[in-house]
Image (tube, rainbow, N blue to C red):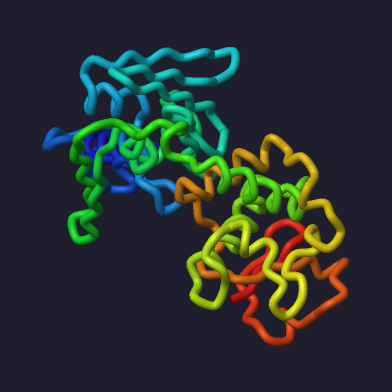
Amino acid sequence: MARKILFALIIAIFLLQTPAAASNVSVYVDGEPLWGAYIANNTTMVPLRRFCKSISSDCAVSWSSKTRTAYVSADGLSITARCGEEYIVANERYIYVGKNSFISDSGVFMLPVRALAKAFGASVHWNNSSRSTTVTSGNGIIESGAEFYDADAVYWLARIISAEAQGESLRGQIAVGNVVMNRVASPDYPNTIYKVIFDRRGGVQFTPVANGTIYDKPADVSIIAAKLVLDGADVAGDCMYFLNEEISTSFWITENCSYVMTIGNHSFYV
């Protein structure tokens, strides 16, 4: 009896220390199970090396312990992923991963399955009832940044992000970019980034347009934030407005809109 109790305790401790068992998630890549996946921060995380080898058998993966950076190369594809960075770079495309880039307790570099699948041009399907993720290879790898990004869009989006949110976190800068893009998509605003920035209906929409800082050279991180936004990074949802309440001289937003969240010095509203 004592041996059975001891054995049960050992199994229980093992399960508690194993993220995959604790999260009870299954991942399949082209029909084959992928070992070592688990859920963290409501995101399906997969081992970078194992995932890449599963979806592309001819890819090569290397690791720099000095910079904590993984390098993946396959036919026509190059991925750079630095542990702790909020994005990965695939063929010069910037893919947002947020805080979901870390080394697991077992020493494995984990990344969100959707970010890696996007790099390989694969689709991802989540089945809530079975708590499983299915990854299916596509017809090709991610399009290069040179082909995907519109230079004019990057130019102006980076400038408004930098002018409005330089010094804010990357997430805060992405949120500012999200607001601009939400306006571009709205029938109530002009349909280009440039026109949204310089929209003067009802007065100047953005302070940098009034004080001229919109023409300042954007910070490098703001250029990255712009590319992340253009590549689908979304932290602001449907927000259409933001302001720094400490320095704002107009409170139309706070009086007429619904508060959603605060990131750094900016509050965001719908």
Q: Residue at x 28, y 36 (%)?
A: 121
Q: Residue at x 60, y 51 (%)?
A: 174
106 versus 230 height, above or below: above
Query: Could you say which is closer to the camera, residue 102 or residue 193?
Result: 193
Q: Residue at x 50, y 48 (%)?
A: 230
Q: Is residue 145 left or right of residue 77?
A: right
Q: Residue furthest left?
A: 31
Task: Tell me where residue 68 appears, x and y as whole percent.
Answer: 55, 20
Residue 263 lies in quadrant:
bottom right
| Quadrant of the image containing the C terminus | bottom right
Query: Could you say which is closer to the camera, residue 8 or residue 160?
Result: 160
Q: Is residue 108 left or right of residue 32?
A: right
Q: Is residue 85 left or right of residue 89?
A: right
Q: Using the rendered image of the protein, determine whether residue 18 is visible from the camera's viewpoint.
A: no
| Quadrant of the image containing the N terminus | top left
Instruction: Tally the numbered discs.
Output: 0
53 versus 145 height, above or below: above
Task: Tell me where residue 55 appears, x and y as whole percent.
Answer: 23, 28
Task: Tell me where residue 240 appears, x and y as whole percent.
Answer: 60, 71
Q: Is residue 190 left or right of residue 221?
A: left
Q: Using the rendered image of the protein, determine whether residue 35 is visible from the camera's viewpoint.
A: yes
256 versus 95 height, above or below: below
Q: Residue at x 73, y 86 (%)?
A: 255
Query: Could you say which is closer to the camera, residue 38 or residue 92?
Result: 92
